[in-house]
Amino acid sequence: MLLDYIYNKYKIISIVGMAKNSGKTVALNHLIQESMKGDIKLGIMSTGRDGESIDLVTEGEKPKIFVGESTFIVTTTELLPLGDATVEIMGITNYRTPLGEILIGRVRAGGQIQISGPQTLKEIKEIANLMLNLGAELVIIDGALDRRSAATPSISQATILSTGAVLSRDMNKVIEETIHITNLFNLSPIEDENTRKIIEETIKNNQIAIIDGELNLTPIHMKTALNSGHIIGESIKDNSKYILIPGSLVKNTLEDIIRSTNKYRNVDIVVTDGTKIFISPKDWLKFMRYGFRVKVLNPINLIAITLNPYAPQGYYFDPKELSDRMKYYIKDIPVLDVVLGGE
């Protein structure tokens, strides 16, 4: 059971998808059903909108979300009436979305619901903790399309990654993309405590900087690294040890560093966590061959990968072949098809 990897181990977990229709809601429904059987008080929320029967973007059918009695939910004043579950409003928060004010409810009679929630990491963490304080034993955050930030360790203690056929008609590409994200989530962290303290403070202040071997910090006065790779490259000295990038790490930044210097081979680039890296698998391998080293302040605790062999475009993979091949390449993390069952 998927729940076996979570219950009594973590209080807040996230489910993030590789793309829209990668099976996130199916995995969520699976956990809801397992929680109901185990009489576990669940709290659920989304960083986007989930549970509607028709996708507002693709106009295709979507899995509905069914919850049982005593489930805590986060939704909005406009979405609450669209479900048929009976929900007691426990409190209305100070946060708003285009779909109304965000509220926390407790299900009194089971049924279908639509969920939505806040956008900022601070608000997500705050509302997740509110559900725990109200009595939820486990809170699940459903990450929105292309927003893997719900997986960041500052929000969730563990993450489930949903992947599947929607990524490509080529199974090899699906596997390649999934391995890539898995590797980014598991990048090596900075171990030395003194170094960590300096990096944490610098990233907290949203400051691009370079640290040398004696832990002296040199700020680079740029608001973002997106178009500043050449400035970062020119700032690397012979004794530089770390480049701190508090925001996103993208292909252009690394290409500009390469054009500016060859000293990048002697430093570690440090980002907050793997969700901050937006580089394709092929480009990532290329940069690794060039000698780039990337570390994270906080690795992501990836505890399971769920598979969806069906794509809304109408094509599909053989479920057993997809499962067997994914497990061949990803050995340290459980890979599950929650529709067919089995690990």
Image (spheres, grey):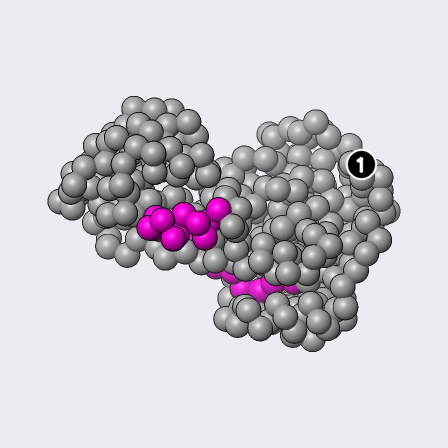
Q: Element under label 1?
A: loop
Q: Residue 155 or 149: which is nearer the viewer?
A: 149
Residue plotted at (21% across, 32% down): 218
Where residue 168 appears, x then y in whole percent? Answer: 70, 52
Residue 5: image quadrant is bottom right
Q: Is residue 325 visible?
A: yes
Q: From the viewer's side, name the closer residue of 48 and 9.
A: 48
Rendered image quadrant of residue 210 = top left
Q: Is residue 209 above or below residue 308?
A: above
The stretch of residues the image draws in magenta is 283-306
| Residue 287 colored in magenta in the image | yes
Q: Is residue 149 magenta?
A: no
Q: Quadrant of residue 164?
A: bottom right
Q: Is residue 97 left or right of residue 272?
A: right
The image shows residue 59, relative to residue 96, as above or below, that is below
Q: What amino acid type is highlighted by mark number 1?
A: Leu
| 212 to 77, vertically: above or below | below
* Image quadrant in which the N terminus is located: bottom right
Residue 114: % across, % down:
77, 44
Q: Residue at x 51, y 39 (%)?
A: 121
Looking at the rendered image, the quarter that the C terminus falls into is: bottom right
At horizontal 78% and vertical 36% (from top left) the residue drawn is 57
Check disc 1: other Cα within 10 Å, few if <14, some if 14-19, many if 20+: few
Residue 44 in the image: state x and y as whole percent. Answer: 66, 51
Number of marks in picture: 1
Residue lying furthest left in this view?
214
* Residue at 60% across, 30% down: 94
For mark 1, what is the residue? 56
